[in-house]
Image: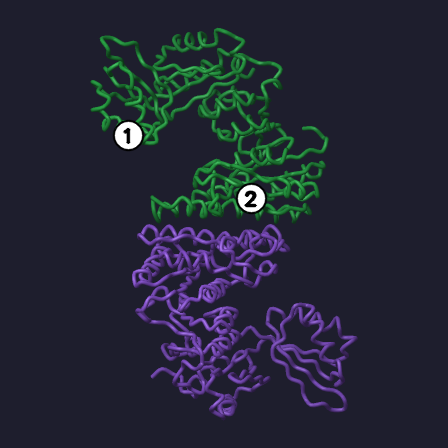
Chain colours: A green, B purple
Amino acid sequence: MSSKPQKIVMKFGGTSVADIERIRNVAKLVKGEVDSGHQVAVVVSAMSGETNKLVGWTKELSPLHDAREYDTIVAAGEQITAGLLAVALSALGVSARSWLGWQIPIKTSDMHGSARILDIPASQMNERLAQGQVAVVAGFQGIANDNRISTLGRGGSDTSAVALAAALGADRCDIYTDVDGVYTTDPRILVAGKAKRLEKIAFEEMLEMASLGAKVLQTRSVEMAMVHRVPTRVLSTFAPEKGGTLLCDEEDIVEKNPVTGIAYSRDEAKITLLQVADKPGIAAAIFGPLADAGVNVDMIVQNISEDGKTNLTFTVGRAELDRSLAAIEKASPEIGYKKLLSDAKVAKVSVIGIGMRAHPGVAQTMFMTLAEKGINIQVISTSEIKISVLIAEEYVELAVRALHSIYGLDAA
Amino acid sequence: MSSKPQKIVMKFGGTSVADIERIRNVAKLVKGEVDSGHQVAVVVSAMSGETNKLVGWTKELSPLHDAREYDTIVAAGEQITAGLLAVALSALGVSARSWLGWQIPIKTSDMHGSARILDIPASQMNERLAQGQVAVVAGFQGIANDNRISTLGRGGSDTSAVALAAALGADRCDIYTDVDGVYTTDPRILVAGKAKRLEKIAFEEMLEMASLGAKVLQTRSVEMAMVHRVPTRVLSTFAPEKGGTLLCDEEDIVEKNPVTGIAYSRDEAKITLLQVADKPGIAAAIFGPLADAGVNVDMIVQNISEDGKTNLTFTVGRAELDRSLAAIEKASPEIGYKKLLSDAKVAKVSVIGIGMRAHPGVAQTMFMTLAEKGINIQVISTSEIKISVLIAEEYVELAVRALHSIYGLDAA
């Protein structure tokens, strides 16, 4: 990027710090930025496998454990990496110190296990950065009001990094991971090399990509980057020279294609209630018990009414299907339906692009293309910048390939 | 012990919490005390092997690492165990919470890596204990003035436990370990079964035993138990019913044998300077450079002077021999000696007993016994309650067995 001295937050995930050799490699990448004159704060995850080990032990002792103890246990993983990277940096002659969540302190809500960051005081850390000391921050963790360690939930180190970048007023946040950027679609689903790495993607688009199944960045971190307008880059620890993908404001993207990418998710299940009474309060009767059971309902379609009865279809996460059906059956006297149907073999395919606002006909192209391939659309939902359809799971690859091609996303 | 409700600190070492099954076992032992109506604080070490793994990683990255980062890294081990044991206790229906060093806070000196405990505020924890909540405390760690994690040095969890017991005003401190108490000598050196477990031992005796090579308890923890008069028990996690050994005041031991135990240490090396000028300042010229090199000098003997010259012999830890010789050779112009001799194949054997104050002749018995076996005594040092001799290492077993027998310590 720019050679003007900047303030940078670098974030490294678990595979990037999986062993001592890789931690040394990360230290070299950090040294590179320091040698270019930049001020650097680094956010690290636990060494790959460490968090799963700690979570496994905790669950073995008790499936229903105290979330405060869970946080105390798993936060040790990032603590270890932060200390080790500080040692590795010092060994390269780079001034560095580790910072744990409670030392900064990264203040969070009291929702242990999935806390939200409330505040990060930046003055002390900015002072050290200005003196040329690298701050190595344990990701994923903070401190709650009860003076106990909190964690942000799985994948939360991305969020730590973006929040820290916002608090420090950093010029950019670089998320180093095991892929070299955000692609037009999942490269594994296309014929080799057909998916293209995006140079830039708008925050809004990335948010849709992330929440629709692209696993590159955690949704919360993208939201935070968008809200605080933190230019955020995704790039590979093992091939940083490729440059990665920059998440930025819509205005910073000059050439806007109608469609930027195709996302898909197999983590879907469909539920249909036949012959529900079409009367006020019926939606509350159905979705209330689901909310109480902690189920997130995604797409919802209600057919037109016939003889005061209607059919209602919606989707839930596949892992939540059994729980959802049980909740509905339990509430069946209040709801009153004729039949309850479900299908766990469905998938959601979405086309995403801020450009579709200015290009009408994107939806029509999607529906035509799927029809030509003989793929039946079961549910449709749309937003300003995305169109999602629910289809039978077996057609996912076919659908993604056809759409990727028709919107001109295939690499030459 | 007593069935009257008491306040107890229980401490479990690394082998006692080595895996999930053993942590469950520890939880059951703690529950036993809680069910008897006692208030319980538990101090835990890192799971066996964990600390070595973390230290290994740190050293691999840099042999000369920042001690503050070292502390941050290794303290994670006890943090994990504390959280896991709290979860295990909750699973048994016992109210419990983990406490990290910085949460209590256990305030220490700034000597990272080998910090000393300065203060443990007890009121908050005592309040919780009185409410019936078990406190699970991460051993070995505290917080220094710089708001960073400090550790007490290897084996420091014993010290954490005794210090906590003193601060809380506990009725006793139970150190659970992988041996079932303190023996009259190292059981491995005697014919099977001849060493006896001591029911009680005076603090002063234990201090000599610990510093002279008996590895059951860390010296600092015994000192602290003595100073704060904390009745401290050593007992086996795997056979607690045996009852262990109680460390107590001298007055609480009714029957005082002249000798309580025999200790030995192979970690010795002897250095002799021949023909040193016998003049004021010569000791400073020799031991000053050794102190500067961080060498602990133990036994010292100076022969009578002849023609203004004397021979000087002293012992150092075997691992420090090379460093010691280098320091002396470097200072040779200031010291002025004719020849420098050294011997790394020496060992120290000690007889210990508060009873020897009242029984003259203990030393004479020792010297006679060794002479009868043909064992030459190279250096002698004594205190009120112990006599130590330096002998050739090859005679250690022979000497210990003969002394154990002559002082009537052999089990029937």
Q: Quadrant of residue B133?
A: bottom left
Left or right? Give the position of A313 relative to B293.
left
Dot 2: within a 10 Å radius of its alpha carbon, few (fewer than 14), some, or many (20 or more) residues? some
Q: Amino acid at mark 2?
A: Pro
Q: Which residue is mark 2?
A: A105
Q: Nearer the viewer, mark 2 or mark 1?
A: 2
Residue B245: image quadrant is bottom left
Q: Is residue B66 left or right of residue A324?
A: right
Question: Which residue is at a point 61% across and 41% down the rendered structure image?
Answer: A25
**Camera-side residue: B303 or B113?**
B113
- Given the image, on which type of amino acid does mark 1 rest? Asp
* Furthest residue in direction right, as rendered: B333
Is B197 located above or below residue A225 in the figure? Answer: below
Q: Give coordinates of residue A13: x percent, y percent.
A: 53, 37
Q: Position of residue B251 (x, y in %)?
A: 43, 82
Chain to which the residue tagged by mark 1 belongs? A
What secondary structure is found at the residue carrying circle 1? helix
For this rendering, which residue is in front, A374 or B70?
Answer: B70
Q: Is residue A289 left or right of residue B409?
A: left
Q: Give the percent coordinates (x, y) of residue A189.
A: 45, 22
Residue ID for mark 1: A322
